[in-house]
Image (cartoon, grey):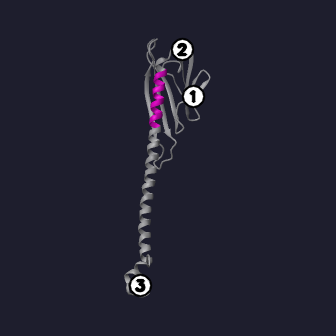
Amino acid sequence: MMSKYFLKNKKFLKSNKGFTITELLIYMGIFSILLVVLTEIFVTILKVQLESEATSSVEQDSRFILARLMYDIQRANTVNLPASLGDQGSVLRFIIGGVTYTYTINNDNLELTMNANANKLNSFDTTISNLTFQRLGNPGGINSINVGFTVTSKAKRASGPEIKNVQTVIGLRPN
């Protein structure tokens, strides 16, 4: 009896067959399109993140270095390098409270040496180049230091590295 029931009820037999090859191909095609779209979105997100990290590291390093230079230069008792008005160089040396501070480039990094202790001022993600210091002012007056440097990201982007040129004048405080 049971077999006659199954033979008569074709709907039941048809529902147990599973998927046809056409249905599988349609599902696989839709899944492939969805996978391609999601992969493109993921790649775009990674590119945007890389751009953001490069911009962020350059901006953060340039602000930190500039703030540190302003803080130290304004506290300087004596500026040794550049030695006289109009002199320009890639090394800044001055004395604060008997401690010698020296700013210089070493292997594409900005280093601050206090007595014999060297500290790297930029992050691992950036390099510093084109460092210049020029002494400005009037003879017998309060001097200023013209500071310039370039911060470049190490991130490999399609559009090239993020670059920021910084140029400012920092005045010495009177003793």
Determine the CA span between mark 2 and mark 3.
101 Å
Residue 136 quadrant? top left
- Where residue 135 appears, x then y in whole percent? 48, 21
Query: Dot 1, crowdedness within 10 Å: few (<14), some or many (≥20)?
Result: few
Given residues 51 and 10, the one toward you in this image is 10
| Residue at far front of view | 1
Label annotation for residue 6? 3
Q: Does the magenta stretch include residue 63?
A: yes
Q: What residue type is labelled 3?
A: Phe
At mark 1, the secondary structure is strand
| Residue at far right of view | 116
Q: What stretch is highlighted in magenta?
A: 58-72
Tell us which disc is closer to us: 1 or 3: 3
Do the residues bearing badges 1 and 2 touch, measured as CB atoms within 8 Å? no
Where 60 falls versus 97 (above or below)?
Answer: below
Label annotation for residue 8? none
Residue at the spot of label 2: 97
- Where residue 45 appears, x then y in whole percent? 43, 51
Residue at the spot of label 1: 119
Residue 168 quadrant? top left
Do the residues bearing badges 2 and 3 touch, measured as CB atoms within 8 Å? no
Q: What residue type is labelled 2?
A: Gly
Magenta span: chief secondary structure: helix
Where 148 falls versus 72 (above or below)?
Answer: below
